[in-house]
Image: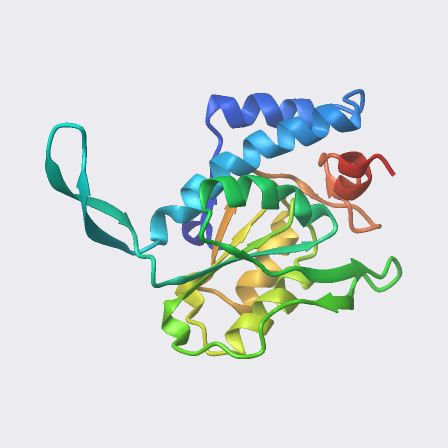
Amino acid sequence: MNLEKVKVINNPVVLLNLCTMRDKNTDSQGVRIATRKITRCLLYEAAKNLPLVEKEVSTPLTNFMAKTVDPNINLIISPILRAGLIFTDEAIDILPQATIRHIGMYRDEKTLKPVWYYNKVPMDAENPENFYIYITDPMLATGNSLIAAIDLYVQKGIPINNIKCICIIAAPEGIKNIQKHYPDIEIITAAIDDHLNEKGYIVPGMGDAGDRIFNT
């Protein structure tokens, strides 16, 4: 596992909310609130790779050249349904120019392989070097779903350095699996947990993120 390509964001605000969302006694509303606070911190970290340009603005006092995100890039937030949806509200608030492209997969409980049921990724990507992709999923367990999602964008010619995986809790097995296929991709997470159990759940983890977020 190459930790140089894994950024663990564990400031006190993240740790406080991570503790809340792990606690089995936290209700769904509490999990959602804590998750959103963590995702905001992770998205700020991810956005460090966005290209900047200068723009002339007028303050109440004077005109000056301010730095801002290049408006000509194509910024895509790609949540893996259903748990990845928790990232979208925060992403749109922070990055209003972003497009949301949903990816629908569920995990086969016997094989632990992803099963597709929805794909909202655009078919064409003109000037792929101008695309910046953030694939979001709260739990990086086996990594199989994330690999399938990364494949979608790589096949369109988008540089791997423009694609980031953003998750809240990651298992070492999942990180190793992704790095086996895409050694140069950056993974941003709030925690690297101990291991996967025999059912493919992260330990200590937080249980099923989708169930706990959506109270199902």
Residue at the spot 72% in from the left edge and 34% down from the top edge:
204
Q: Nearer the viewer, residue 179 or 57?
A: 57
| Above or below, comparing residue 206 to residue 99 in the picture | above
Residue at the spot 71% in from the left edge and 36% down from the top edge:
205
Left or right, residue 215 beside residue 162:
right
Q: Nearer the viewer, residue 121 or 34?
A: 121
* Location of residue 162 by image quarter: bottom left
* Location of residue 216 by image quarter: top right
Residue 79, given in percent of the width and then of the height, sits at: 63, 54
Q: Nearer the viewer, residue 88 or 178?
A: 88
Residue 139, given in percent of the width and then of the height, sits at: 67, 46
Residue at the spot 55% in from the left edge and 39% down from the top edge:
90
How was this image coloured? rainbow
Left or right, residue 52 beside residue 88:
left
Left or right, residue 157 beside residue 116:
left
Instruction: Tell me, yes or no, if residue 22 can be seen here.
Output: no
Residue 213, given in percent of the width and then of the height, sits at: 75, 36
Instruction: Tell me, yes or no, if residue 129 can be seen here.
Output: yes
Residue at the spot 41% in from the left edge and 51% down from the top edge:
4
